[in-house]
C-alpha cells in the first residue's frame, strides 16, 4: 500500500520534535535520565528491545522468551539484594507499578489475615509519592511520619504509629527528596516483632547501593524486610519501562496476582497491573545486565561515586549553599545555608534557574513537611565526562544569584479569586494564565516563581492547577 505520509518524512518530524527535548545523553540533565555514558550499551539495549517488539508480555506461556528473560533478570537482582530462594518476584513496568503492587499485596494479605475496616499505610513523608498514589488507588489510610529538616526519620517515630490496622510500613533506600537511607534494620526489628510487613523502596538505589561501600544492611539481608522495589530503568541503565518487585515468601507474593476464569474469554492471570504489555524494556534490561555483569555495574557505580563526592565537596565550598543531611548514594539535595547572613545565602531555586541558563538542568523541589526549598541532583556515570564544566557552572550560578531572596509569591497569589468550591477547568486555566502559563503549557524561563507559588498554595488547589496544566498540554489542537 502507499502510506498517507512518507516514513522518512514522519521520522524527520519526530527527530525535530526530539531536538526540542532536554538532552537525554551527555550528563546535562541531572534527574529523570540515567546515562551510563556507553553508546554500545544503548545500542545493545535498543537491539534487544527491537527483537522483542512484536511480543506480548501478557502471556509467558505463549511467549516463553518472556518467562526466560524475567526469570534470569529476577535472579540477577535477587542475588544483588541478598534474597534467598524464598524471595520471588515480578518484572513490572516501572517504579510506580512496583510500589503500587507492594501496597496492593500488603492490603490483600491484611484482609486475608482477618483485618476489617480500612488498613493503614505508615511511611516517612519522604517516601516516594507513588505510595501516596497507592494508598489513594487501593483505599488505605495514608499515615505520614514526620522527618527532621535533614530528611531523617527516627525508628521510634515509626514505632508510635504501629498497630493492628497497619497493613504495611515503607522505608526508602534511599529516599528521593533528600537521599536519606532510612533506618531499615531498626524499623524491621519493630515491624517484624508485631508481624507487620516492611517494604524497602529501593527504586532508585536498588541497582547502585549494592556497589556502594560501607553501608549498613538495608535489603533482604535484614530479616524483617518483606519486599523490595528496584528500578532497572534507573541505575540498571535500561530504557524506561522496567523495574522489579521482589517479595519474601511465595504465599505472600501470590496475593499480588489477579486471576479470573469468570468470563467467556481467555483465563486472565496477571501478576502486574497491565494486561497486554511490551517486553522490550525487559529484554533491554536483561541484555544490559549480561553485558555489564557485576563488575561492569561496580565500575559504573565507582565512577558515579567519585562524581558525587566531587559535587558534594564543590557545594560545600560554595558560600551560601549546603548539602541537606547525609546523602547515601548518587543523589543529593541542596538548600540555602542558614549559617551565613541573608545577603550571602544562595536560594536553591534561583541557583537551579541560573544553572539551567548555563546548560545544566537541575530539579527544583518545593519546601514541604519541614524540609526547606531544595534543588535535587541525580548523578550518573556520564557525569564524570562533564564534571569540570558542571562544577564550574554550579559555582558561577551561585555567584550570579547570591543574596537574591526566595521568590515572594504574595503578589501572584493576590490574583487568585476567592475559592468557594471545586474549580472548573476554565477557571483553573484562567488562574494559570494569570501566572503566565499559557494554554500550550509553555512554562516560563525561570521556575523559581512557579515553585514559590506551589509552596504556599494549599495542596488541593495546587494539585488542581497542575492537573489542569498537564491536561491542557495534551489536548488536541482545534
Ligand atoms: C523513581 C522512584 C520511584 C518511582 O519510580 P518511577 O519509575 O518513576 O515510576 C519510587 N521510589 C523512588 C525512591 C524513586 O526514586
Image (cartoon, rainbow, N blue to C red):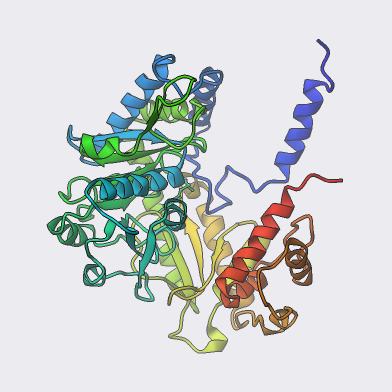
226 w.r.t. 350: above or below = above
Image side of residue 335 versus residue 227, left or right: right
Q: Nearer the viewer, residue 127 or 373?
A: 127
Residue 251, horizontal then vertical, whole percent: 22, 36
Residue 209, horizontal then vertical, whole percent: 31, 48
Q: Would residue 168 be seen by someone viewing this image from the given angle?
A: no
Residue 404, horizontal then vertical, whole percent: 63, 82
Q: Quadrant of the N terminus?
A: top right
Residue at the (55%, 48%) spot, across then down: 27
Q: Nearer the viewer, residue 106 or 53?
A: 106
Residue at the (49%, 20%) spot, across then down: 265
Q: Outermost residue toward the top? A: 1
Residue at the (22%, 64%) spot, across then down: 163
Residue 101 occupies which quadrant of the picture?
top left
Q: Nearer the viewer, residue 364 or 266?
A: 266
Image side of residue 447 versus residue 458, left or right: right
Residue 438 occupies which quadrant of the picture?
bottom right
Amino acid at each position: 500500500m502507499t502510506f498517507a505520509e512518507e516514513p522518512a518524512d514522519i521520522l524527520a518530524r519526530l527527530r525535530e520534535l526530539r531536538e526540542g527535548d532536554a538532552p537525554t545523553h551527555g550528563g546535562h540533565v541531572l534527574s529523570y535520565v540515567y546515562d551510563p555514558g556507553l553508546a554500545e550499551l544503548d545500542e545493545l539495549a535498543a537491539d534487544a528491545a527491537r527483537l522483542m517488539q512484536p511480543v506480548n508480555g501478557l502471556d509467558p506461556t505463549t511467549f516463553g522468551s518472556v518467562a526466560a528473560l524475567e526469570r534470569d533478570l529476577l535472579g540477577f537482582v535477587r542475588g544483588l539484594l541478598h534474597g534467598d530462594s524464598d524471595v520471588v518476584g515480578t518484572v513490572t513496568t516501572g517504579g510506580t507499578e512496583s510500589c503500587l503492587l507492594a501496597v496492593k499485596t500488603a492490603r490483600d494479605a491484611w484482609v486475608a489475615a482477618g483485618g476489617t475496616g480500612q488498613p493503614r499505610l505508615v511511611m516517612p513523608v519522604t517516601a516516594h509519592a507513588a505510595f501516596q498514589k497507592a494508598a489513594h488507588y487501593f483505599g488505605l489510610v495514608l499515615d505520614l511520619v514526620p522527618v527532621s529538616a535533614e530528611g531523617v526519620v527516627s525508628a521510634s517515630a515509626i514505632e508510635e504509629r504501629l498497630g493492628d490496622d497497619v497493613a504495611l510500613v515503607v522505608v526508602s533506600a534511599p529516599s528521593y527528596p533528600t537521599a536519606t537511607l532510612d533506618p531499615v534494620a531498626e524499623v524491621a526489628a519493630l515491624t517484624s516483632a508485631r508481624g507487620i510487613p516492611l517494604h524497602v523502596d529501593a527504586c532508585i538505589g536498588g541497582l547502585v547501593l549494592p556497589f556502594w561501600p560501607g553501608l549498613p544492611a538495608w535489603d533482604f539481608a535484614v530479616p524483617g524486610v518483606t519486599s523490595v522495589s528496584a528500578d532497572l530503568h534507573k541505575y540498571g541503565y535500561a530504557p524506561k519501562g522496567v523495574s522489579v518487585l521482589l517479595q519474601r515468601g511465595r504465599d505472600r507474593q501470590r496475593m499480588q496476582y489477579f486471576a479470573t476464569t469468570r468470563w467467556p474469554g481467555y483465563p486472565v492471570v496477571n501478576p502486574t497491573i497491565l494486561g497486554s504489555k511490551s517486553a522490550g524494556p525487559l529484554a533491554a534490561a536483561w541484555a544490559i545486565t549480561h553485558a555489564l555483569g557485576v563488575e561492569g555495574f561496580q565500575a559504573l557505580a565507582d565512577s558515579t561515586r567519585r562524581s558525587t563526592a566531587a559535587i558534594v565537596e564543590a557545594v560545600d565550598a560554595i558560600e551560601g549553599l549546603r548539602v541537606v543531611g547525609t546523602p547515601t548514594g548518587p543523589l543529593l539535595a541542596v538548600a540555602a545555608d542558614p549559617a551565613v547572613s541573608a545577603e550571602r545565602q544562595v536560594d536553591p531555586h534561583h541557583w537551579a534557574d541560573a544553572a539551567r541558563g548555563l546548560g545544566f538542568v537541575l530539579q527544583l523541589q518545593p519546601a514541604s513537611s519541614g524540609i526547606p526549598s531544595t534543588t535535587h541532583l541525580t548523578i550518573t556515570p556520564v557525569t564524570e565526562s562533564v564534571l569540570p564544566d558542571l562544577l564550574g557552572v554550579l559555582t558561577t550560578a551561585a555567584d550570579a544569584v547570591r543574596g537574591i531572596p526566595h521568590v515572594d509569591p504574595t503578589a501572584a497569589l493576590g490574583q487568585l479569586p476567592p475559592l468557594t468550591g471545586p474549580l472548573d477547568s476554565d477557571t483553573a486555566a484562567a488562574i494559570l494564565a494569570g501566572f503566565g502559563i499559557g494554554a500550550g503549557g509553555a512554562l516560563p524561563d525561570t521556575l523559581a516563581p512557579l515553585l514559590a507559588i506551589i509552596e504556599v498554595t494549599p495542596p488541593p488547589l495546587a494539585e488542581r492547577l497542575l492537573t489542569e496544566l498537564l491536561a491542557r498540554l495534551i489536548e488536541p489542537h482545534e
